């Protein structure tokens, strides 16, 4: 498919392989050669490295590492967080690298939510669907984007603050209650921003986190994501959000101790 991937990390490689993307822009000094286990089978992905991205470009770098001024038209961000100046494909999935080096999704079937896109993305959406990834096309992707950010603002930061795994956080009644209260606060923050999240997010959070306990959250790999996730939500809050603020304070304390 005529798609370029900017940032062939775990998510970029998973979606790039699923789209058969022939080109990649990478800071790596070595060729990209990944074995990717997709829902409908193994695929070897060996894209050609190019110096500058071509359109359409799938932006899979972190928000804070993205050069927004130098993206081609019709770029699409496969990123966690909020506030991106380009359309976002919201990724409800947990991507990890297995012990044998293979990249795959774990726990939950991968699902992507997208809003209206330029026609050049149609072949990519079809390729993702053919690879076994569920595609949901919606008129407004903001509710999905806020929901993903809310999920990312709870358990992942608690893992970072405590050193516990997702499974350990979710198995602990106190941590789980804090995560669910923070989820409720996130929904209210979204509502104040005019974004309505469908009822049942707590149940969806329970289903997701109970199935991805071995997943290493991206925020643990790169705490630089925090400002575009937890920080963004707190920056949007017009009323007190004590659970989210407590998570932020735990992070601040753990960072102070580590220094």
Image (spheres, grey):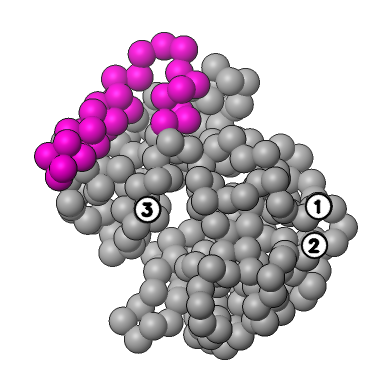
Residues at marks 3 and 1 touching, judged by CB atoms closer than 8 Å: no
Q: Return the residue at label 1.
A: 73
Q: Return the residue at label 3.
A: 222
Residue depicted at x 39% and y 65%: 107
Which quadrant would the N terminus be assigned to in this image? Answer: bottom right
Q: Earlier in the sequence, mark 3 or mark 1?
A: 1
Q: Quadrant of residue 22?
A: bottom right
Distance between the alpha carbons at the discs numbered 2 and 1: 6 Å
Q: Residues within 10 Å of mark 1 (few under 14, many from 20)?
A: few
Q: Which residues are magenta?
A: 231-259
Q: Could you say where residue 202 lies in the image, as x and y percent from the top left?
A: 40, 37
Tell me if 113 is positioned left or right of 180 in this view: right
Q: Could you say where residue 199 lies in the image, as x and y percent from the top left?
A: 51, 32
Verify whether residue 215 appears in magenta: no
Nearer to the camera, 165 or 59: 59
Q: Return the residue at label 2.
A: 55
SS class, disc 3: loop
Q: Earlier in the sequence, mark 2 or mark 1?
A: 2
Residues at marks 2 and 1 touching, judged by CB atoms closer than 8 Å: yes
Tell me if 19 is positioned left or right of 170 in this view: right
Distance between the alpha carbons at the discs numbered 3 and 1: 27 Å
* Residue sticking out furthest to the left: 257
SS class, disc 1: loop
Nearer to the camera, 5 or 244: 5
**Above or below for 100 versus 121:** below
Tell me if 207 is positioned left or right of 136 in this view: left
Nearer to the camera, 153 or 47: 47
């Amino acid at each position: 498919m005529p798609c370029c991937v900017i940032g062939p990390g775990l998510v970029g490689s998973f979606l790039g392989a699923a789209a058969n993307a022939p080109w990649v822009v990478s800071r790596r000094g070595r060729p990209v050669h990944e074995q990717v286990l997709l829902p409908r089978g193994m695929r070897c992905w060996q894209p050609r490295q190019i110096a500058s991205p071509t359109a359409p470009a799938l932006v899979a770098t972190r928000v804070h590492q993205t050069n927004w001024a130098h993206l081609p038209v019709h770029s699409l961000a496969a990123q966690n967080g909020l506030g991106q100046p380009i359309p976002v494909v919201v990724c409800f999935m947990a991507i990890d690298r297995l012990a044998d080096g293979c990249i795959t999704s774990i726990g939950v079937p991968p699902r992507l939510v997208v809003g209206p896109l330029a026609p050049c993305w149609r072949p990519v959406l079809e390729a993702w669907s053919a690879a076994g990834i569920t595609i949901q096309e919606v008129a407004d992707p903001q509710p999905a984007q806020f929901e993903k950010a809310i999920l990312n603002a709870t358990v992942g930061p608690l893992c970072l603050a405590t050193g516990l795994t997702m499974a350990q956080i979710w198995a602990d009644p106190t941590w789980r209650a804090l995560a669910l209260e923070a989820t409720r606060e996130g929904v209210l923050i979204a509502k104040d921003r005019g974004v309505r999240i469908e009822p049942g997010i707590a149940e969806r959070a329970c289903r997701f986190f109970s199935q991805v306990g071995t997943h290493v959250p991206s925020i643990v790999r790169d705490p630089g994501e925090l400002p575009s996730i937890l920080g963004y939500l707190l920056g949007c809050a017009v009323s007190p959000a004590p659970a989210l603020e407590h998570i932020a304070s735990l992070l601040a304390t753990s960072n102070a101790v580590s220094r």
